[in-house]
Image (spheres, rainbow, N blue to C red):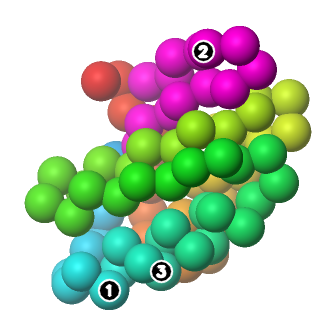
Amino acid sequence: MTATAGSTTRSVFRAEGFSCPSCVAKIEKRVGRLPGVRDVTVKFASARVEVDHDPSVTSTDEIIAAIGAAGYRATLSAF
């Protein structure tokens, strides 16, 4: 899911492979380093990753790749 507000978009992803709460910090750190990303929130219990970003700077594919580089598989969520 992607919702736009001005130049900031909130995209929601589902991630797989979480085994402990430290996984949250790993994803937040990796995605948070991307240019154009303003905020990253990872919900451990639901495996949701919510990212506020500028889509003209960082695409959802780049965010999925960053989550993958952290060691987890992710897809853009429908809700």
The answer to which of marks 2 and 3 sits earlier in the sequence is 2
Query: Which residue type does callout 1 highlight?
Result: Ser
**Magenta stretch, residue numbers:** 1-13
Q: Position of residue 7 (x, y in %)?
A: 76, 20
Q: What crowding class fits label 3: few (fewer than 14 Cα within 10 Å), some (14-19), or many (20 or more)?
A: some
Q: Mark 2 points at which residue?
A: 4
Q: What crowding class fits label 1: few (fewer than 14 Cα within 10 Å), some (14-19), or many (20 or more)?
A: few
Q: Name the residue under label 3.
A: 26
| Left or right side of 5 for 57 | right
- Where is residue 18, by image quadrant? bottom left
Q: Where is residue 31 in the image (x, y as percent from the top left)?
A: 62, 63
Q: Is residue 48 found inside the magenta-colored segment of the image?
A: no
Q: Position of residue 21 (x, y in %)?
A: 24, 80
Q: Name the residue under label 1.
A: 22
Majority secondary structure in the magenta region = strand
The answer to which of marks 2 and 1 sits earlier in the sequence is 2
Q: Is residue 3 found inside the magenta-colored segment of the image?
A: yes
In the rendered image, the vertical position of residue 29 relative to residue 53, given as above or below: below
- On the question of residue 5 being in view, the answer is yes
